[in-house]
Image (tube, grey):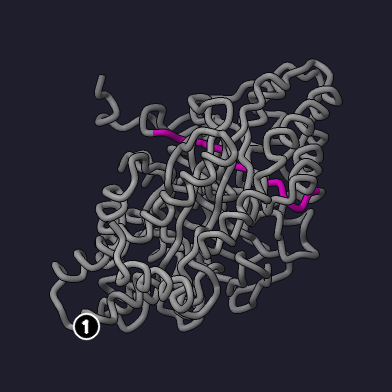
Amino acid sequence: MLNISDIMQTVNMIDHQHLDIRTITLGISLYDCASSDIKTCARKIYDKICMKAEKLVETGEQIEREYGIPIINKRISVTPIAQVAAACESEDYVAIGRAMNDAAKTCGVNFIGGFSALVHKGFTTSNKRLIASIPQTLAETELVCSSVNVATTKAGINMDAVKLMGEVIKQTAELTAEQDGLGCAKLVVFANAVEDNPFMAGAFHGAGEPECVINVGVSGPGVVWRALQDVKGESFDVVAETVKRTAFRITRMGQLVANAASERLNIPFGVVDLSLAPTPAQGDSVARILEEMGLEVCGTHGTTAALALLNDAVKKGGVMASGHVGGLSGAFIPVSEDEGMIAAVKSGALNIEKLEAMTCVCSVGLDMIAVPGDTSASTISAIIADEAAIGVINSKTTAVRIIPAPNKKVGDNVEFGGLLGSAPVMRVNDAGSEKFIARGGRIPAPIHSLKN
């Protein structure tokens, strides 16, 4: 039973601590849109998305007004297009990407995810066509997001796919050079991708999902940061308990919104994703939470331990507040989308190597990182391979969303605007990885994957 104190705490979190629902994401199955003719397939995809998501934005806005809770994004995820388009006789799938973009605009959503392929154990013909279509699709569309899963703990790492994705990222950057390589901000390479992630750019509607589903992603780094200010100097036991209690309150609000959206749209509720998703705004930073624990600056020694505590406490608190928790759930560390991360990089305290160490204990991986435009495809592939190895060995989701910013060098800045923010261009290791990446094949699954 809510009391006046609970209500006032929530109002304060919304008004002064950047608490919001980051996204309501409607997942839609597109399997029944398959056709041998790509124009027919694209038309069916457009029609089905528009029919199923017709009232998504309107419903989200109604909930915002009635509950006074900001819902920043309304999004759509769809079945991986490489699976839907497998029957198409066309050599490329750009036309489907355009249809997705048109449907997203018609429905009024912020992004649509699912221009995706799952290739952790090998390629189908459709997978190859989808991946080859990514650069042009992301260059031609505004709202389409793409993801490729190259590894799982059960399958190991598909190094042929890793090599290919380094090349695709470079091509995408070149085709969107006038926008500082913006296309790469809509492309993520995964290990152990999940089927119910509501966050972009990695959202897709997995094969095990129902016809349609509502997934909600909450936020609230500012709320956690403010809560920790009240326990300065206390032990880590107190810090962990404070984060847990705060995550519980944040997640309860997400559950409330998810239930309301599900009931009004007559679509099943899927999961609440507990992830702390930062923004470029002051006071809404994961990095500042870590510094509030006692670090002089994010990136110094102790940062990984602080992030591990935060990630674990968020999950422990949030899982008690919702019957169905899923997605990625934890703490995100995207550089361009986090004011504190940006400041840490500019100060020299945070580099790619330290970020990689932090990804061992956070929700995702190397996220929204800008590197020099002349970074080679093989270096990008090697970065992906390192991050995939962390995910495979630790049985967790990891990812790389990296932007080789055309014509930019270390110390320059790239501007994406909105929630994507801006990023200082970071140094990469000068030593080459070409021969390593050229080997191809598969890195085998770890021994602990044999659990059957």
Graded by Cα atoms within 10 Å as few (under 14), some (14 to 19) or many (20 or more), the crowding at tag 1 reads: few
Q: Is residue 15 above or below residue 113?
A: below
Which residue lies at the image location 43% right of the left edge and 48% below the top edge?
A: 273
Which residue lies at the image location 77% right of the left edge and 17% below the top edge?
A: 35
Q: Quadrant of residue 8?
A: bottom left
Q: Is residue 30 left or right of residue 275?
A: right
Does residue 128 appear in this view? yes
User: Which stretch is magenta?
Assistant: 141-152
- Look at the magenta stretch and give its main secondary structure: strand
Q: Quadrant of the C terminus?
A: top left
Indicate whether residue 217 is drawn in magenta. no
Which residue lies at the image location 68% right of the left edge and 39% below the top edge?
A: 53
Which residue lies at the image location 36% right of the left edge and 47% below the top edge?
A: 390
Q: Position of residue 150 (x, y in %)?
A: 51, 36
**Label 1: which residue?**
232
Does residue 435 appear in this view? no
Q: Is residue 119 left or right of residue 223?
A: right
Instruction: Please name the amino acid that badge 1 sits on.
Output: Lys
Q: Position of residue 291 (x, y in %)?
A: 33, 78
- Nearest the viewer among 19 and 315 is 19
Q: Quadrant of residue 163?
A: top right
- How many numbered circles are shown? 1
Q: Secondary structure at mark 1?
A: loop
Q: Quadrant of the N terminus?
A: bottom left
- Nearest the viewer among 227 and 394 is 227
